[in-house]
Each structure stands twice: as C-alpha cells, then as structure tokens.
Amino acid sequence: MGNDLKTLEELVELRGEGGDNAIAGRERFLIAEEFPILVDECDHAATWIKRHAKRGRRYKQFICALAQNDTAENFGLQGDKDTLYSCFCLVRLGQFGRDHAKTKLKDPQLEQWLKAGGKRRFMVDDQPCELDLSNWGAGGMVQPENSGGGNEEVRSPQDLNEYEQIIVTWGQEHPGEILKARVLQQASQQFKKDDPENIRILFQSLADRRLGEVVDSGDRLGWRWSK
C-alpha cells in the first residue's frame, strides 16, 4: 500500500508535467480483501483508500475494497462516511443484499426478488442488479451427442442457493410429479413458514433458468423437474 501511494504521487507529477499522454498505459485496478484487517494491521490502509478514492480515478488508479459490512470504520474512514458513499459504488452480495433490502429499504418484494435469483442478483447502492449467467463458464453447459447432426445446449444445475437446491432435489426424486407450494411447505422444514407466493417466485426463477418447468399459473402454479 505504501508503494501504491508512491506510485499515485508519481502519476500526479507526470500528468502535471505532460498531461494525460504522460500516464498512458499506467492504468491499474487494485483489490484489497478483508479491508477491516488491513485497517487494523497496516499503517497505510486509511491513507491508501482515501487518496485513491479522492484522486486515483483521475490517474486511472481504481480500487475495490472488500469487507463484511459497509460501516465507515471498516474502511478506515471514521468520521468521513461521506467519502464512502460519494466516491464508491457499494455492491452488496447474497444475504447482505437481502438484509439491505429488508432493513434499510424496507422492501420485502425486493428481498424476495433477490432471494429468488440466487447469485445472479445483488444490490449496487440502492439499486437491484441482475447478471446474465447463461453463458457463464464452460462447465455449465454440456453438448450431448445428436444423431441429427447438430448440437443442443442443455443447462445443468449450477449456482443454486440452499432453497433452490431443495426444490431441484425434490424434483429429481419425484420425476414427472408437479410440486406445489403447499406440498413443499409440508415436505421441507425450511419452507414450512414461507409465504406460498415466495415459493412460486422460486419456481418461476428456476424455470426461467431452464431448471424444470412451471405448470399452470397464479395460485395454482406448480413446478416439475424436466431435463
């Protein structure tokens, strides 16, 4: 981090003398994991994040700081919370995104939307975001033999959260049977107290990813496993 700060000062001088052309090709993207530990153990951490946040972008020195929550203290910004919210985009993944939707935004529908999307969905600041993972990684696609001379893409189950995995497992153990929200509540302790509409959202999300298919609609909507 000390060397990064020296590099930043060097770029400031170079750009001041020769303009943007003088720092061409010096772009960097720096990732600092477990930032709260760095704050506790590294003398340069607080200065590193402040200087890069306030000056680094102009000199193409971008940073990503990772932590388990978004308190200013975790990023060495005690008393300077405005820097955290004005100079950074806050990306909240998994349960952190759902908690933000529930407690900060007080939006239960957004919370369920995030839950239904698994790893594809998260929060960027206060906005929901969804990634298209349809072509993510070669391991997610298999190419079966096809006597007709062509290849057909078949999606394999991947990136399932705990709740989706329960549904898919039930479907694979009950091929051809239609799973309804009420049946899932009776069959799984995890879904026992869940809202039936939330379960149907999960059914639809799986079907959208070509993991099974939905049958019927509205309160009668169900899901069954299909390859």
Image: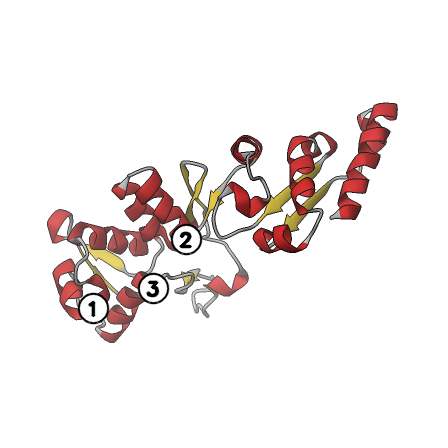
Mark 3 residue crowding within 10 angstroms, few (<14) / some (14–19) / many (20+): few
Residue 188, label in figure: 1
Q: CA distance from mark 1 to mark 2?
A: 22 Å
Q: Is residue 178 visible?
A: no
Where residue 24 appears, as percent x and y from the top left, is 81, 34
**52 on left or right of 151:** right
Which residue does the image show at 56% across and 34% down from the upper left? 80
Q: Earlier in the sequence, mark 1 or mark 2?
A: 2
Q: Quadrant of the C terminus?
A: bottom left
Mark 1 residue crowding within 10 angstroms, few (<14) / some (14–19) / many (20+): some
**128 on left or right of 16:** left
Of residue 56 and residue 113, the one placed in the foreground of this image is: 56
Residue 94, label in figure: 2
Q: Quadrant of residue 57?
A: top right
Q: Amino acid at mark 2?
A: Gly
Q: CA distance from mark 3 to mark 2?
A: 12 Å
Where residue 185 appears, as percent x and y from the top left, is 16, 63
